[in-house]
């Protein structure tokens, strides 16, 4: 029996809700838009119309894969973050609303500067650095990422967002000292891998089975990248420059300690909209770049 777009949407929303998907309404819409090749405006306009057999088959196939656990962002190949639509694939983490708090802290820090150099370290899809660049035309942004596959996605997203004059991708290992070219930044923003190794296996299957492990696993206690970056990358900051981390829901006190032990001052912690302490940031002052060179013991 032929089905309207509204029939397909309501069936999908019900199935996704039954499977425990929190954003069932959003995901049903995105899958149906993608399967039918319609914009959101066209989707709303055409809800009473009958879907073609091809569109219905594509949609039901996609819905089946989503119900089996595959994230909708990977199924449609893109996702929205801070007003930008970005390419995503299984080589990068899916941008999440929690990370928008890191972007907002960066924008707030940069807003009164005439010009600024910004580094998005552990860039993944480039979502953080691109969102900052899109909102801060005074900022020159570097997306630094170790994974070649993720760098490819960064390049795609720089072009897609029309930011080729403002943003550049660079390969860099966050666990090693910065190369000479990556110096003199006013701001380093970083959303590193922070899931403790043993907890990765206990993540939701849609994360554990599909998203890149190297972007999740933060070592035995989840703090490996915070220690290395706080100690080794402080030399990449100008005096007065700031390092801001996204952190896991219970990691803020430990990361505050790591920053303090490595000579950062003016340490601040900010909640995300879900009331989790999500961003920890500290500033390098004159003469403190060599402090804490022995590393953090947390």
Image (cartoon, rainbow, N blue to C red):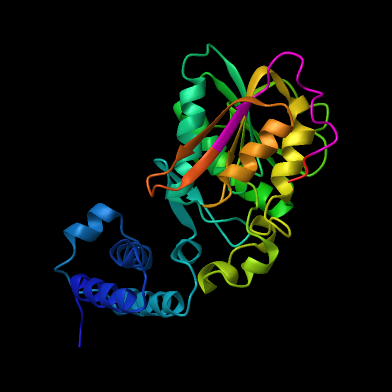
In this picture, residue 223 sits left or right of residue 85:
right
Q: Which residues are magenta?
A: 280-295
Q: Is residue 196 one of those drawn in magenta?
A: no
In this picture, residue 51 sits left or right of residue 123:
left
Residue at 37% x, 45% y is 273
In the rendered image, is residue 159 in sight? no
Q: Is residue 276 above or below residue 257?
A: below
Q: Quadrant of the N terminus?
A: bottom left
In the rendered image, is residue 79 in sight? yes
Q: Which residue occupies the extreme bottom position in the image?
A: 1
Q: Nearer the viewer, residue 257 or 113?
A: 257
Residue at 63% x, 42% y is 255
Q: Nearer the viewer, residue 89 or 160?
A: 89
Total numbered labels: 0
Residue at 57% x, 56% y is 93
Q: Is residue 288 above or below residue 123?
A: above
Q: Is residue 133 above or below residue 17?
A: above
Q: Is residue 284 one of those drawn in magenta?
A: yes
Q: Which residue occupies the extreme right position in the image?
A: 294
In this picture, residue 162 sits left or right of residue 24:
right
Residue 56: x percent and y percent? 31, 77
Residue at 35% x, 62% y is 30
Residue 23: x percent and y percent? 34, 63
Q: Is residue 282 above or below residue 198?
A: above
Residue 289: x percent and y percent? 77, 22
Q: Nearer the viewer, residue 125 or 235?
A: 235
Q: Which residue occupies the extreme left position in the image?
A: 48
Residue 102: x percent and y percent? 51, 38
Q: Which residue occupies the extreme top position in the image?
A: 114
């Amino acid at each position: 029996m032929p089905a309207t777009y509204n029939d397909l949407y309501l069936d999908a929303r019900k199935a996704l809700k039954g499977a425990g998907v929190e954003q069932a309404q959003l995901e049903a819409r995105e899958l149906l838009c993608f399967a039918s090749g319609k914009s959101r405006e066209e989707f709303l306009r055409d809800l009473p119309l009958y879907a073609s057999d091809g569109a219905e088959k594509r949609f039901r196939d996609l819905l089946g894969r989503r119900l089996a656990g595959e994230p909708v962002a990977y199924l449609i190949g893109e996702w929205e973050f801070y007003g930008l639509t970005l390419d995503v694939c299984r080589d990068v983490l899916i941008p999440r609303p929690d990370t928008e708090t890191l972007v907002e802290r960066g924008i707030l820090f940069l807003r009164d500067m005439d010009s600024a150099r910004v580094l998005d370290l552990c860039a993944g899809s480039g979502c953080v650095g691109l969102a900052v660049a899109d909102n801060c035309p005074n900022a020159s942004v570097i997306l630094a990422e170790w994974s070649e596959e993720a760098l490819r996605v960064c390049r795609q997203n720089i072009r897609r967002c029309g930011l080729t004059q403002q943003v550049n991708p660079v390969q860099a290992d966050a666990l090693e000292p910065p190369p000479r070219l990556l110096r003199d930044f006013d701001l380093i923003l970083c959303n590193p891998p922070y899931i403790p190794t043993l907890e990765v296996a206990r993540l939701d299957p849609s994360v554990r089975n599909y998203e890149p492990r190297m972007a999740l696993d933060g070592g035995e206690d989840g703090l490996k990248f915070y220690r290395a970056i706080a100690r080794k990358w402080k030399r990449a900051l100008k005096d007065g420059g700031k390092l801001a981390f996204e952190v896991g829901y219970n990691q803020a006190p430990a990361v505050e300690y790591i920053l303090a032990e490595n000579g950062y001052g003016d340490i601040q912690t900010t909640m995300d909209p879900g009331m989790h302490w999500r961003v920890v940031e500290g500033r390098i002052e004159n003469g403190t770049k060599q402090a804490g060179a022995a590393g953090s013991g947390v």
